[in-house]
Image (spheres, rainbow, N blue to C red):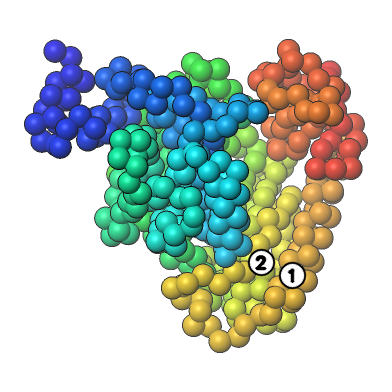
Amino acid sequence: MNIISTLFVLLLHKTGGASDVQNQTSLFCSSLGLHYLCTQMIDNTTFDNKKVAFHTLGCKLNFAETSTIGKLLADRGAQPVQAGETPDICVVNTCSVTELANKKCRQEIRKLSRRYPDAVMVVTGCYAQLNSEEVADIEGVDIVVGNDQKAEIADFVDRWYADHEPTVKVTALKDIRQFIPSCSRGDRTRFFLKVQDGCNYYCSYCTIPRARGRSRSGRIADLAEQARRAAADGGKEIVITGVNIGDFGYDTGERFIDLLRCLDSVEGIERYRISSIEPDLLTDDVIEFCAGSKHFMPHFHIPLQSGSDEMLKLMRRHYDRQLFADKVAAIKHLIPDAFIGVDLITGMRGETPEIFEDSRSFVDSLDITRLHVFSYSERPDTMALKIPYVVDQHTKHLRTRRMMALSDRKLAAFTQKYLGTVRPVLFEHAVDDDGLMKGFTDNYLRVAVPADTRLSNTIVNVRLVEPLGHDDLIKAEIV
């Protein structure tokens, strides 16, 4: 009897039946990189070719996890819905980073429910985790699943088909300890490798620790095996994702820099990108390693949130602006071509006109490439609600527009610098309606060339010619 069969028999004696043991065994196998063996134990005709529609809102981590959910459903016989088909199952993976995100989630759920009234409606993600009863009350919702149960969605759908009973399953915050692995491509060229989940920072404006739980990580050996499988599946680029990836190893004792070194040695993966990393966790050895690596791209995304030290204290961030400036300077010194994206929040409680101007002036002084600007959204049960100074909505929008204008200028200047130069580009699979194929340079400039399907998922050198004037695209030519 092999190890998987033995595990199945042992768990069968300790659980409520085959459905429970399949789920536990699947999670165990996934952590060991044995997903294929586990799927051999599962009846892949459970859903009998039922069609599934997926709708994902929010971060890259959500997109990675949606793709993993899709794989688990496909293991039971489900198929992704095609254009013109009616889904039997709808899975909505939600976001709750702002109140606007919550609103968009509700709109998406209601729209799908009206359009496909006979489909099983499954809602998961951060909005479902934080507001499970509110989600369950939306007409047409059948299953509400928290972040800790995403790997069990196939089981919940299976049970719904058996008894048609609505389900709400959300793990309490204090009990969220499980790391659910994910390395998925879906319909994207790049793979997204989840290395970490949860956050221990508790910034004053943020609900993510309440939605995702405490920081927890995968093991380096397991993550490297997932990267090798991505390479075997034709992957050329992996984006390293998580909630607070610089905190990798908090619960395992391993180090983020050692993860990067291990991934760098995986044969077949030509590009890695670090999706987002806190400035205080972006260590000098990580920057130096990326500078010397052929596989880690000259591209960083670093959340600043405010350029004012006073505001950073109110936000309960873990650094001051001098540290942030030093990190940017270190990157540019060692990797002059690096694209540096920066997150900002405008209009948070406590941001007086003077503080905003101070923040804007500091951001303007930085040698960065692009800003991702968010208007502050009040979130329930956050410490920021205790700050007395409130910024009105109109002022928030004006400040956001000013920061976005600053971002546009910085991106235009960065783009101009590389016009006429030759950069390597990984081209995506899709050919758009405009007859163009698109891809990203090593330093994250998005380019377009006339469609040639032979370019799909290949890295070729192109010369950047001129901005196309929309979607931040640059016209390029193959060299």
Q: Looking at the rendering, which quadrant does residue 337 occupy?
A: top right
Total numbered labels:
2
* Contact check, label 2 and label 1, Cβ < 8 Å: yes
Q: Please name the amino acid that badge 1 sits on.
A: His
Disc 1 crowd, CA 10 A, few/some/many (<14, 14-19, 20+): some
Secondary structure at numbered mark 2: strand
Query: Would you say 143 lies left or right of 5 here?
Result: right
Q: Residue at x 13, y 30 (%)?
A: 12
Secondary structure at numbered mark 1: helix
Q: Quadrant of the C terminus?
A: top right
Residue 470 in view, yes or no? yes
- First along the sequence among labels 2 and 1: 2
The x, y position of residue 412, in whole percent, is: 84, 48
Per the rendering, the mark at residue 375 is 2
Report the Cα–Cα distance between label 2 and label 1.
7 Å
Q: Residue at x 56, y 28 (%)?
A: 81
Q: Residue at x 53, y 43 (%)?
A: 117
Q: Is residue 478 above or below residue 201?
A: above
Q: Please name the amino acid that badge 2 sits on.
A: Ser
Which one is in front, 15 or 63? 15
Query: Would you say 233 lies left or right of 407 here?
Result: left
Disc 2 crowd, CA 10 A, few/some/many (<14, 14-19, 20+): many
Which one is in front, 468 or 288? 468
Q: Looking at the rendering, which quadrant does residue 105 occupy?
A: bottom right
Q: Which residue is mark 1?
A: 397
Query: Would you say 173 lies left or right of 432 here?
Result: left
Q: Quadrant of the N terminus?
A: top left
